Amino acid sequence: MRNVLQKNSPIVLIVSLLVLGASTWMLLGAMDAGPDFDRKWMYDLAADELVVAPKTQLAPSDASGRTFDYPDAGSAGSLVDAVLYGCGNHGQPKPGMSRDQLASRGVHIGYLSRYPDPVKAALEAGESLGGDAPHLIADASGAAWVRELSPQGDAILAALSDLCGGDVPRAIRP
């Protein structure tokens, strides 16, 4: 075998390079492209489904054409920012999935987020709010919205540590 390889070394080299090239092509084709930092997860509270939107879209948004009645805040667009976390060997979330469908794949909505109406209006008008603008957050149900920097907001964020039953939840980007 050694003699055959030595006599045909140019052919062996070409075949080796072809196998290496084909292997690389197959590996790159099978790899996930990774997170898309120009897009974000949003959740349509009226339709009960996950949506992928441009990162620049402000919540609450009426881009879906639907509205939602927010407790103590009135009616506004039904799309809100969603922060997703995966537990263990989770599946990949897909647009159109409901909270139950996400949970069946080991994916959970850690919390929902939106701007208070006056803050959103200021941002849409191009005003600079200096640093992070205040947010309202809610658990995955979207039933009660509280200021992010409040004791109730702290409780929603603290609940993330229990999301995966002792495992460390991992953030999932689109």
Image: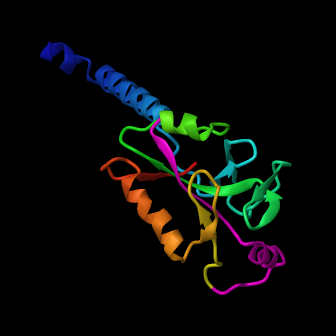
Looking at the image, is 136 positioned above or below residue 102? below
**Residue sitting at 41 percent across and 52 percent down?**
170
Side of 43 relative to 86 (left or right): right
**Residue sitting at 47 percent across and 32 percent down?**
30
- Write down the region rendered in magenta: 105-130
**Residue sitting at 31 percent across and 27 percent down?**
13
Looking at the image, is 74 positioned above or below residue 8? below
Q: Position of residue 166 (x, y in %)?
A: 30, 50
Side of 42 relative to 18 (left or right): right
Q: Position of residue 125 (x, y in %)?
A: 84, 78
**Looking at this view, is 113 or 174 the one in front?**
113
Q: Residue furthest left?
A: 2
Magenta-drawn stretch contains 52: no
Quadrant placement of the N terminus: top left
Looking at the image, is 36 positioned above or below residue 71? above
Q: Residue furthest front?
A: 72
**Looking at this view, is 18 or 29 the one in front?**
29
**Residue sitting at 61 percent across and 79 percent down?**
132
Q: Position of residue 110 (x, y in %)?
A: 51, 54
**Looking at this view, is 83 or 28 the one in front?**
83
Q: Position of residue 76 (x, y in %)?
A: 81, 60
Picture colour scheme: rainbow
The quarter of the displayed image where residue 62 is located? bottom right
Magenta-drawn stretch contains 118: yes
How many numbered marks, from 0 up? 0
The quarter of the displayed image where residue 159 is located? bottom left
